[in-house]
Image (cartoon, helix red, strand yellow):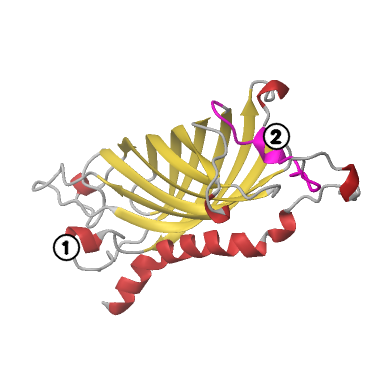
Amino acid sequence: MIGDRASARYPIYLMLAILLLCKSAFGQGTVDQPVTSAPPDDSVNPGQSAHPKLPDFNEDIYYKNRLEFSLETGFLPINIPFVYNFITGDSYTRRPLNYTLIPNVASIRWELGNIDGGPRILRGNTDFSFSGSYTDIARGPETRYFAFDFGIRHNFVPRRWRVAPYFDMRGGVGDINAKGPDGVLYAQGEDLTFTYMMGAGARYNFNPKFSLAAGANYMHVSNASLSAPKVVNYGINVWGAMFGFYMRLGRAKPRSEAK
């Protein structure tokens, strides 16, 4: 029981660790800007700083109403109990039937605003995603899962860093070729199935148009007990690695909007 409880919390611990480590470990991702020596004090106009703030190229990547296409794929082979069992009151037990999911998610992303201020580690912005996904079930009685997902992500964007950590959640509804009605123990109860995903990682921005990302992702699939009591709902709970490719849609940000 203790082992199951610790395993269930591994995704949350790992995602928090990624966010903290990116802050320090990816400091080398900062792009150095040429700095000229400040003029003598007597040449500085009143009210003008001798050390002007350098421009942040990230303002050309994270800004209001920017649209983006992303393609993500994962490998999720680690089976765990449902991570929110502490809320539902269920015991932290893992089903004996193991799954390996390989999600492939194509999304349109819409950034809600410009980079906001605040503490340095929280500086960033938020985006919505609208996704269609196909999940190959490499291990388990079912073989595939189609879904539509909606998500929200917060991007942590330090000034002039090419590396930007993120944390996201998404949920959706889809269709799985359920084997529970065929009598397979611990398989899914019906074809109509819901998804919840939670992930964290870091994104590397090559330029304002193209980016890559890598992180950890937890995925839950179940039918919310809609098939009960005829067929018991057990659900799928797995986590593993997730990788993504991102491409801006449309033209670059107009210079007149830069700040």
Q: Which residue lies furthest to the left in this view?
A: 229
Which of the 4 image quarters holds residue 175? Answer: top left
Is disc 2 placed on a helix, strand or loop? loop
Residue visible at 50% across and 53% down in the picture: 200
> Depth check: 231 or 224 in front?
224
Q: In this view, does 54 lie above or below 217?
A: above
**What residue is shown with label 1?**
89
Neighbour class for label 2 at 10 Å: few (<14), some, many (≥20)?
Answer: some
The stretch in magenta equals 49-65
Residue visible at 22% across and 55% down in the picture: 234
Instruction: Name the kind of residue labelled 2 in the image.
Output: Pro
Asked whether residue 117 appears in the rendered view, the answer is yes
Q: Which residue lies furthest to the bottom in this view?
A: 2
Asked whether residue 38 appears in the rendered view, the answer is no
> Depth check: 37 or 131 in front?
37
> Depth check: 223 or 211 in front?
211
Is 24 left, or right, of 172 in this rendering?
right
Magenta stretch: includes residue 51 = yes
Give coordinates of residue 54: x percent, y percent: 76, 43
Instruction: Name the kind of residue labelled 1 in the image.
Output: Gly
Neighbour class for label 1 at 10 Å: few (<14), some, many (≥20)?
Answer: few
Contact between labelled residues 1 and 2, with CB atoms less than 8 Å apart = no
Residue visible at 56% across and 27% down in the picture: 67
Give coordinates of residue 211: x percent, y percent: 66, 41
Spatial distance from mark 2 to mark 1, Cα to Cα?
Answer: 46 Å
Which quarter of the rendered picture does the C terminus lie within?
top right
**What residue is shown with label 2?**
208
Which quarter of the rendered picture does the N terminus lie within?
bottom left
Q: Is residue 102 above or below residue 69?
A: below
Give coordinates of residue 119: x percent, y percent: 54, 53
Is 167 left, or right, of 257 in this rendering?
left
